[in-house]
Image (cartoon, helix red, strand yellow):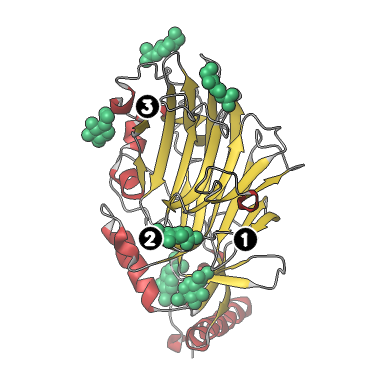
Amino acid sequence: MVSNLPSLGVLLWPLALILQPAFSAQYTSTDTATPHDNTGNCTCYVVNSGASSNSPSYFQYYRFFDFRNLADQSGQYVTTPPLVNNSDSAASESVWNANILNSNAWNSDWGIQNWSKPATSDFPTHMVNSPANVFIQQNDDSSDAFTFLTLRTTRLDDFQSASEVENEQKNLMHVSMRMHARVTGSKGAVAGFFTFFDDDNETDVEILTDDPTDTIRYTNQPSVDKDGNEVTTASVTAKQLAPWDEWQTHRIDWLDRNSYWYLNNKQVAANTYSVPRKPSGMTINMWSDGGEWSGNMSVGDSAEFQIQWIEMTFNTSGPVTGTAGGNKRDIELLETRKDKGCKVVCKIDDVQTLGTPEIVSVSRAAEMSVSWGLLVFVGAVALLVGM
Ligand SMILES: *[C@@H]1O[C@H](CO)[C@@H](O)[C@H](O)[C@H]1NC(C)=O
Ligand SMILES: *[C@@H]1O[C@H](CO)[C@@H](O)[C@H](O)[C@H]1NC(C)=O
Ligand SMILES: *[C@@H]1O[C@H](CO)[C@@H](O)[C@H](O)[C@H]1NC(C)=O
Ligand SMILES: *[C@@H]1O[C@H](CO)[C@@H](O)[C@H](O)[C@H]1NC(C)=O
Ligand SMILES: *[C@@H]1O[C@H](CO)[C@@H](O)[C@H](O)[C@H]1NC(C)=O
Ligand SMILES: *[C@@H]1O[C@H](CO)[C@@H](O)[C@H](O)[C@H]1NC(C)=O
């Protein structure tokens, strides 16, 4: 009888599948594949969205970008890099921490921007995005030395030194995207977390450092009409929120015909105005241009947008391989997943380990092998106990 049973390793896999520990997506100087979906076996992901909590949305793909474990030791990234002061060289200055932020792993997921825009009468401050305003920082506490990604903006005499990072998945077609972040520093800056196709297909979380720390702007663009007048339905100014200068989890659900915004998993805004209809990318930025929306920063002032992790579950328009520098292994993984359809449904909220989705249901075909495995597992335990 005993000899007919498979080895214990085989017996245990279904349980391992359910209890698998997180292996966080790390950016390293080596080019090892980093599957950002920590989930070998989920074939789709479910989130509850909207006013009624029993309205599930299903997505095909999942990514967890973890910036918390990038240091080898405490104190490694506690010094803030020098300010980017020179408007002529800002766009061509190199990113800091290039071992991470210019690694192949990083570059296959993210693009650090260097575009600029001139001063105009409506936006009187010349703005230049500099890669050197993007860097890794670390909590200055040896017992809690987590790292995070920082985007900085600084006002100089002659320009605004700013920063922007785009995700390379440019064909998102509906997404639930979250970030654990805070914004610190002087007034007159805007921290943006948004989907973008063009100025008329864009869903934003914007934290204005001119606002009180309990206030966040949630907007579907366009927020001004052709005559330059504000469209009042475009933007919700939510108040009495948890303070944005402390770590909070911000979330946008871009769905078909509905946008929902959450703070710490509580819905704080909704909109049906101009819900984007075009395949979009995800962008984070930190900027100011002296206009009505951002306000002015005082010369010499800085502000920082700091992010511990970004999580997204999404569908795409067309192949998920849309990215130019896409990692082959990841792509294969995602494509295999796609073929399987929605058989193994995973949740991403209320999980034991952040960033590690958990199986909530398995369709019949897949279910049979899992329950078979569990059955054999129970048998093995009985056998061991019997011994
Ligand atoms: C996924 O399931 C397979 C069995 O079909 C198993 O070999 C593999 O270890 C599982 N992967 C993870 C990450 O649990
Ligand atoms: C994502 O794609 C799947 C498969 O096509 C579809 O069933 C699901 O409704 C889509 N989800 C959203 C939110 O668009
Ligand atoms: C920019 O100016 C500040 C203040 O004068 C200085 O501390 C910093 O080193 C300068 N940055 C560079 C790259 O020279
Ligand atoms: C922006 O970055 C690209 C790629 O690194 C570089 O070729 C280009 O010269 C930069 N633009 C400016 C204005 O410095
Ligand atoms: C999205 O872009 C298309 C094409 O540029 C445009 O017609 C449409 O108005 C935009 N906005 C929405 C919400 O569809
Ligand atoms: C920012 O400062 C400029 C120059 O002083 C001024 O023209 C502009 O109106 C200011 N913007 C705001 C929003 O106060």
Give yes or no for contact between labels 3 and 2 (Cβ–Cβ under 8 Å).
Answer: no
Residue 349's disc number: 1
Q: Earlier in the sequence, mark 1 or mark 2?
A: 2
Query: Is 215 displayed left or right of 3 in the figure?
Result: right
Q: Is residue 341 left or right of residue 236?
A: left
Asked if 63 appears above or below 241 in the picture, the reply is below
Residue assigned mark 3: 132
Three-letter code, disc 1: Asp
Q: Position of residue 274 (x, y in %)?
A: 54, 59
Residue 387 occupies quadrant = bottom right
Q: Position of residue 194 (x, y in %)?
A: 50, 48
- Quick one: SS at disc 3? helix
Q: Amino acid at mark 2?
A: Asn
Real-space CA distance between mark 3 and mark 2, rounded to the nearest whole angstrom: 27 Å
Please name which of the two marks, 1 or 2, marks the residue nearer to the observer: 2
- 165 versus 17 height, above or below: above
Q: Is mark 3 within 8 Å of ligand 3?
A: yes
Identity of the residue drawn at 36% across and 45% down: 110
Type of amino acid at the residue the image marks with label 3? Ala
Tell which of 383 and 60 is nearer to you: 60
Instruction: State the residue at coordinates (34%, 34%).
Output: 115
Residue at far front of view: 227
Q: Nearer the viewer, mark 3 or mark 2?
A: 2
| Nearest-to-viewer mark from 1 and 3 | 3
Q: Is residue 30 above or below residue 53?
A: above
Q: Which label number is shown at residue 73?
A: none
Q: Residues within 10 Å of mark 2 (few under 14, many from 20)?
A: many
Ranked by sequence position, the earlier of labels 1 and 3 is 3
Give x and y (percent) for residue 7.
43, 77
Which residue is at the front of the view, 266 or 91? 91
